[in-house]
Amino acid sequence: GVISDVDDTVVKTHVTDKSKLLGAVLFKNSRQLEPVDGAAANYRRARASGARAFFYLSGSPQNFYLRIQDYLATQGFPAGPLLLKNLGEDNLAKQEGYKLDRLEQLLASLPQMRVVLVGDSGEKDPEIYAELRRRHPDRVRGIVIRKVPGTNGAAARFAGMTLIDDRYPSEDVISALVR
């Protein structure tokens, strides 16, 4: 399976630039959002290469469900559950605990599934995914991280991960890990 972040992984929401983030979140509908070049093609190729399940895990609130779901469908991403934060129960400010808990729940509910994790460098995806791989080395086949422009980090932050620059360079980045 493929478990993917949404913001700045498949759609450019500029999470690291709050003024751009507000513009993308508040003033653009699903058809106006800016796609990450090559992302949808990579996900479709992963499906064709044998990925049987896709999950989209985001720290966005459930209020954005229809907007994100429409974006994914319009762009041609493989269908899959969209997991978002519940404003009444999940702390919007705590990404790491929320995502790691959801990832653990997914692995527990699908014990035979091995996964490729796809995220970005804008927030804590590399650290969260590295922790999940540390806990479940036999379940995590690989990690793909989109390096968001303007973010840096020590090489250790990305150890053992496939790094891509602003756009997905080919249709085989994710599928190479699925096979």
Image (cartoon, rainbow, N blue to C red):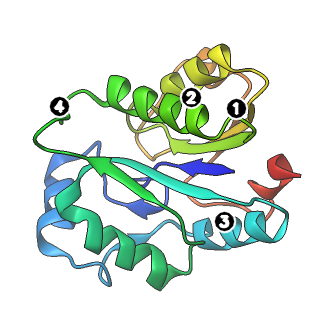
Viewer-proximal residue, 42 or 65? 65
Classify mark 3: helix, strand or loop: helix
Q: Which residue is mark 3?
A: 43
Q: Which residue is mark 1?
A: 161
User: In the figure, residue 69 lies in which quadrant?
Assistant: bottom left
Q: Is residue 128 above or below residue 66?
A: above
Could you tell which of marks 2 and 1 lies nearer the N-terminus?
Answer: 2
Q: CA distance from mark 3 to mark 4?
A: 29 Å
Q: Which numbered disc covers residue 129?
A: 2
Q: CA distance from mark 1 to mark 4?
A: 28 Å
Viewer-proximal residue, 175 or 138? 138
Q: Which residue is mark 4?
A: 91
Residue drawn at (51%, 28%), measured in percent from left and top? 104
Q: What x and y, as percent, mark residue 153? A: 50, 23
User: In the figure, residue 33 lies in which quadrant?
Assistant: bottom left
Q: CA distance from mark 4 to mark 2?
A: 20 Å
Could you tell which of marks 1 and 4 lies nearer the N-terminus?
Answer: 4
In the image, farthest residue toward the right: 179
Could you tell which of marks 3 and 1 lies nearer the N-terminus?
Answer: 3
